[in-house]
Image (tube, grey):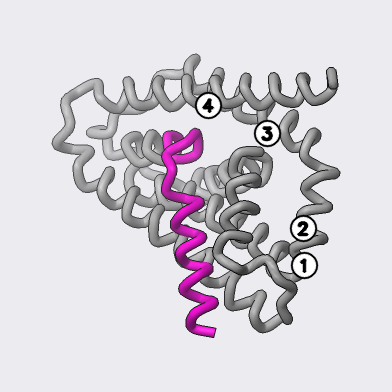
Amino acid sequence: MEALFLKGAGLGLAVAAPLGPIGALCIARTLERGFAAGLSGGLGTALADAAYAAMAALGFAVFAGVLAVIDLPLRLAGGAFMLWLGLRGLRRTPPRAEAGIAIGARDLLGTVAATFLLTLANPSTILSFAALFAGLGLASDAGPGAAGVVTAGVFCGSMLWWTLLSGAVAASRHRLPQGFTTWVARLSALILTGFGLWAIGSALRLLAT
């Protein structure tokens, strides 16, 4: 069980660490609103990673079959959501980090929900997850106990990464030059817009074939 947990934690770290659209979004939220805002984004991602881990551990063949059926709708939904977040981010002016803005529970829950849905609907995350799951030898059918251990490991590994990332960004944000937060927020919005367009484009190409 310890080995399964460590494998799951390694998988959670491997999936979370690449700085794609969700990483950019969490960095921007941390710079704008502090550690709690960034970590709440990581929590949404970790919950989605754990959900995929649970499905895969309980039956990899079923997991792969479900992905084959929902791949196209997920590409479209995820692309549209990322495009909306990106365009919304480009239109608004980020708050200054120095302002010490208070964060309410509703804001934190909204960030958790947004990153949870983004992670669930991100085709590249899904494909990476499936490939790494098989590569670590976790693709065989497992009982509920083993599935729970793997799922807990994935969640802890993912949360470890987001805690380290949000903590590092939060610790350095007050030492960064004025205007840095605004540029990072705009870059994050551009990354989200680009990934959204790519996801929608890949879905349209699948429809055309």
Q: Which mark is residue 74?
A: none
Dot 1 crowding, Cα within 10 Å, few <14, some 14–19, many 20+: some
Q: Amino acid at mark 2?
A: Phe
N-terminal of the pair, mark 3 or mark 4, is: 3
Identify the residue position indicated by label 2 in the image. 63
User: What residue is at 57 percent from the left and 55 percent from the top?
Assistant: 132
Left or right of 31? Residue 187 is right
Instruction: State yes or no: residue 79 in magenta.
Output: no
Q: Quadrant of residue 73?
A: top right
- Separation of marks 4 and 1 at Cα, in angstroms: 32 Å
The residue to which callout 4 is attached is 192
Residue 30 in picture, x, y percent from top left: 35, 41
Q: Position of residue 161 (x, y in %)?
A: 39, 55
Q: Residues within 10 Å of mark 4 (few under 14, many from 20)?
A: many
- Disc 3 marks which amino acid? Gly
In the rendered image, residue 2, in percent from the top left (x then y), is placed at 49, 83
Residue on which disc 1 sits? 59
List the residue tagged with mark 3: 78
Q: Are marks 3 and 2 in contact (CB under 8 Å)?
A: no
Range of residues picked out in magenta: 1-25
Alpha-carbon span between mark 3 and mark 2? 19 Å
